[in-house]
Amino acid sequence: MALFQTQTPPPIYSHGFSFKTNSYSPVALPFHLPPPSLPLSVSSLKTHHQSSLFSPSTVKRKLLCSPPHGKHVREDYLVKKASAEEFQELVKGDRNVPIIVDFFATWCGPCILMAQELEMLAVEYESNVRIIKVDTDDEYEFARDMQVRGLPTLLFISPDSSKDAIRTEGLIPLQMMRDIIDNEM
């Protein structure tokens, strides 16, 4: 003999519709639908959000200037963008000045800040240092072969081929770049 017996309550009738509840409790709360004589349509419903300030139906803004097209990083003055082939030609050839290679991406915020610092460094060292940039989106295989994991990545290549290249990842201060060029190259 079962101690508890569960019974399903009888269906609830409201405005001509019947609903069967899936509750096993003996108490069922009545559920009332709107009368079927009131047709509801999406166009008749108006919400507060449609008339808010953020809706597309508000007054259009006047643009002060046209939005930029294409990439986020503009062409630099002294630091030039190089392809993988151009980089390899620079490294293989005879060099009399240190080479700084900046692996960057146009969508990378720290890369944009680093580009400004490298431009100041290029002005300061003029013909004593050669600085080039390699876009990791355009030269994906080359960046993978160079094991670029974080952006921006800088390679400091000495004119002396017996010295190892110095590698940094992330945004580094301008003074640290000066110290590497003056003391390590």
Image (tube, rainbow, N blue to C red):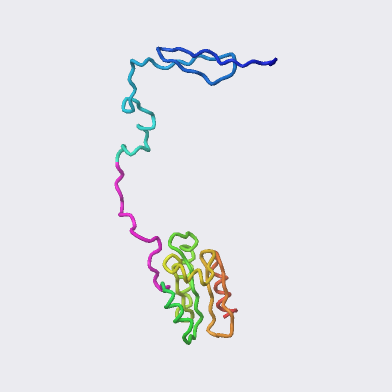
Q: Does residue 92 lie above or below 155 as drawn?
A: below
Determine the image quadrant of residue 167.
Answer: bottom right
Residue 90 horizontal side relative to residue 60, left or right: right
Determine the image quadrant of residue 183.
Answer: bottom right
> x, y percentage for residue 168?
57, 69
Q: Residue at x 61, y 16 (%)?
A: 6
> x, y percentage for residue 44?
32, 25
Residue 30 horizontal side relative to residue 77, left or right: right
What main secondary structure does the magenta stretch of the protein show? loop
Q: Residue at x 38, y 68 (%)?
A: 75
Q: Residue at x 45, y 81 (%)?
A: 90
Residue 58 horizontal side relative to residue 7, left or right: left
Tell me if residue 71 is in the magenta stretch.
Answer: yes
> x, y percentage for residue 33?
42, 17
Q: What is the magenta range?
A: 60-80
Image quarter where the C terminus lies is: bottom right
Q: Residue at x 40, y 12 (%)?
A: 16
> x, y percentage for residue 110?
50, 61
Q: Nearer the viewer, residue 163 or 181?
A: 163
Q: Nearer the viewer, residue 95 or 63?
A: 95
Q: Nearer the viewer, residue 55 or 66?
A: 55
